[in-house]
Amino acid sequence: MDQTDEIESLLSRTALGDRQAFSQLYDRTSGKLFGVAMRVLRDKSTAEDVLQESYIKIWRYAERFAAGGGVSPMGWMVTIARNTAIDRLRAGRDADDIDEMSDRLADRGPTPEQVAEAAGEAGRISTCLSQLDDPRDKAVRGAYLEGLSYAELAEKFSVPLNTVRTWLRRSLISLRECMDQ
């Protein structure tokens, strides 16, 4: 399993509330996210606070990460850390300072190669999603593409909350197997 797949798996397990997976995710990614915060803030203490705030957001919104949605799991987490750092920077500076830094903080976006790779992965994921049973594929799309909560999905499909969790967990396993082929 390569690093991207491992991080994606840990994010999926984190979305299900797995604290051990979240701890492993932190161990594997905190150095990179700390570096992002340091690059924006240039202050170790503030960067450490931003790192903690970023992981709180990652824990809270892990279920919203859409695998294969054009952004790698590490890219998704870097975006959270970067935006949190920028928010902290803006909170501590007046408007004139922010205008001066806008060029330095501009997002360069994905490269053409990354766009092409993401498009290919999106096609593979779409194919794998279509292989899931009808309510399960709609549940996965609702949770990971539309950002619906487990409770909203349970209400939408008129099933118990634990059934939704089981559907999503088993569907993610099936998707992983399909993507590995």
Image: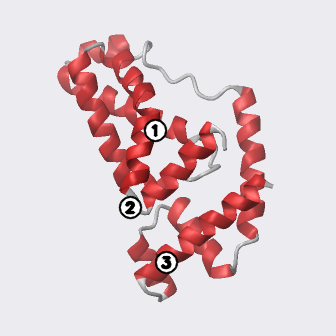
Judge whether residue 122 can be spotted in this image. yes
Q: Which residue position holds label 2?
A: 17
Amino acid at dot 1: Met
Task: Give the number of callouts.
Answer: 3
Relative height, residue 129 to residue 10 (above, below):
below
Q: Earlier in the sequence, mark 1 or mark 3?
A: 1
- Which callout, 2 or 3, points at the residue further toward the start of the chain? 2
Outermost residue, right direction? 181
The residues bearing labels 1 and 2 have C-alpha atoms spaced at a distance of: 17 Å
Mark 2: give few (<14), some (14-19) or many (20+) Cα within 10 Å.
some
- Mark nearest the camera among 1 and 2 is 2
Q: Residue furthest bottom?
A: 158
Q: Quadrant of the N terminus?
A: top right
Kindly identify the residue that appears in the image at 28 percent across and 23 percent down.
47
**Left or right of residue 151, residue 90 in this image:** left
- Looking at the image, can residue 79 be seen? no
The residue at the point 61 percent across, 40 percent down is: 4
Report which residue position mark 3 lands on: 164
Image location of residue 140, percent across then percent down: 58, 68
Please provide percent x and percent y for residue 16.
Answer: 44, 63
- Determine whether label 1 and label 2 are within 8 Å by CB: no
